[in-house]
Amino acid sequence: MATLKVPATVPTAADDCEQLRKAFQGWGTNEALIISILGHRDASQRRAIRRAYAETYGEELLRSITDEISGDFERAVILWTLDPAERDAVLANEAARKWQPGNRVLVEIACTRGSAQLFAVRQAYHERFKRSLEEDIAAHVKGDFRKLLVPLISAYRYDGPEVNTRLAHSEAKILHEKIQHKAYSDDEIIRILTTRSKPQLLATFNYYNDAFGHPINKDLKADPKDEYLKTLRAIIRCFTCPDRYFEKVARQAIARIGTDESSLTRVITTRAEVDLKLIKEAYQKRNSVPLERAVAGDTSGDYESMLLALLGHE
Amino acid sequence: MATLKVPATVPTAADDCEQLRKAFQGWGTNEALIISILGHRDASQRRAIRRAYAETYGEELLRSITDEISGDFERAVILWTLDPAERDAVLANEAARKWQPGNRVLVEIACTRGSAQLFAVRQAYHERFKRSLEEDIAAHVKGDFRKLLVPLISAYRYDGPEVNTRLAHSEAKILHEKIQHKAYSDDEIIRILTTRSKPQLLATFNYYNDAFGHPINKDLKADPKDEYLKTLRAIIRCFTCPDRYFEKVARQAIARIGTDESSLTRVITTRAEVDLKLIKEAYQKRNSVPLERAVAGDTSGDYESMLLALLGHE
């Protein structure tokens, strides 16, 4: 369900490096050439290109890119070129350092990546920042958000398909009781959301709906503007319908007066190799317009071309 | 600093299996033969033996052992034969399921294993129990202990040597202030102990001692019988002096009327390939008697022989 388009015959990493080097040199950068290469290589191919580039030219590819291009285009190319775990580590670091209650990036990373992948992000974080991810979150985030986000990002959830129905029933009841008493940051709500496996949580949310007549997220909408409640709802949406969660992030990024490029770039670069096709379908369904057309209408130049390449635009 | 003695020429895994099979068969088990093999093989050799045994006889080695021997001897041989991460997963599972405030096994595993090793324990836990370790701890442990133990076991601490001196000073002050107000389960104490790297924590504890005139553990002794305070002190001892921490566990296990075989077996099987030599030195220093002699005086039969083999007794 990726949108990334890799050509049938891919040049060797050495050939790609030579072309990229040419794109960087001389008068003016050849942006189209950069996009035509990096925008059409998968994670392992990009990794091979970075390695070959550093060996051949004694300089990091990302450094050369940063020297040649700038702005939203630069950010999109850099984020995309990074390894997925490294990219998430960079995004998580920004989110932790400049954290504010409306920031959902940590929730996204904690809840839409698989267990092994989330752990790879924590490893990449060590490597790059010489600290642990949970350490930075715990140091920058306060109060109920900290109580929720630290275990969320530290979880190594069981990823087998087994579901314990009895447990789903009893924990749905616990969630319902706490929500009824508006005890949204109760230890038990946090324990359930941050430790149970995804299939187990889906069973719990389904039973909640059956037993109490509402989806849990409806009951978490008592105060629609409260950022802590919004965070809880984002967690549940990331577990239950990540495609529709990301569709909404993209929609809001585009709908804003002055596009939210940071969110748009994040959704497209992090999902192009995962489920961007599903997100595009959800977008079309919800907005009656293709996501590519909305992106083309709201962005321009090389930045636009890069996003459209990742969106699989012909 | 291991005590394990592996012979200069080690038989092939196939030969070891054949001998073990002989030890299990016929009238009566040959316990001495089991000890002479398994008590003198390192983790990778034991892993090879288990694999070869299952392939050759279509039965798990651990199953055969369980069928043939029993009691404390059986537990020692089984725990020892397991892979370190698997063994810790088994110990952590027992500790989580039968948790009571005096149980320090989870602290030991969380604080004396390296970051990669602790994560390997969490992986082995998935594999064996089809749940996550933090999920079981969160479900069985309550209150302040849960608040402390879940992040402690979920941590993936940065393991580089870098120390931030300014941070050590400011966090020593936070710890001191909270301890002065007897706010022992304050979020900040838990944050610092559960997220900072070990070198960073050592710097913080050293500054604490310098600035306030007492080791932090002295200030955490306000009520010497309080189990939560004992747990905090155990965490700090596991970080600062694991050899002396384990010496004390061994000493108390032996000193009890009716030896605490469970703790004694745990210390010896989990440390024989790590730092049991240091623990023995600490024991001799503290008790003026060699640990081997104390173990020999307090245990008997095959159990005694197995422990002495792991202690490196000639």
Image: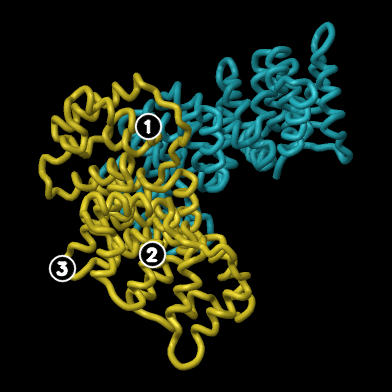
Chain colours: A cyan, B yellow
Q: Is residue B86 above or below residue A244?
A: below
**Amino acid at the residue labelled 3:** Ile
User: Where's residue B278, x and y in %?
Assistant: 35, 49
Q: Nearer the viewer, mark 1 or mark 2?
A: 2
The residue wearing badge 2 is B313
How busy is the neighbourhood of tag 1: few (under 14 within 10 Å), some, or many (20 plus)? many
Chain on which label 1 sits: A
Chain on which label 2 sits: B
Name the residue furthest front. Answer: B314
The residue wearing badge 1 is A138
User: B79 or B285, which is in the foreground?
Assistant: B285
Instruction: Identify the secondary structure beneath mark 1.
Output: helix
Which of the marked residues, 3 or 2, is nearer the chain's N terminus? 3
The residue wearing badge 3 is B257
**Amino acid at the residue labelled 1:** Ala
Instruction: Identify the secondary structure beneath mark 3.
Output: loop
Q: Is residue A176 visible?
A: no
Left-right relation of B255 to A120: left
User: B203 or B196, which is in the foreground?
Assistant: B203
Q: Residue at x 47, y 78 (%)?
A: B33
Residue A67 sits in which quadrant? top right
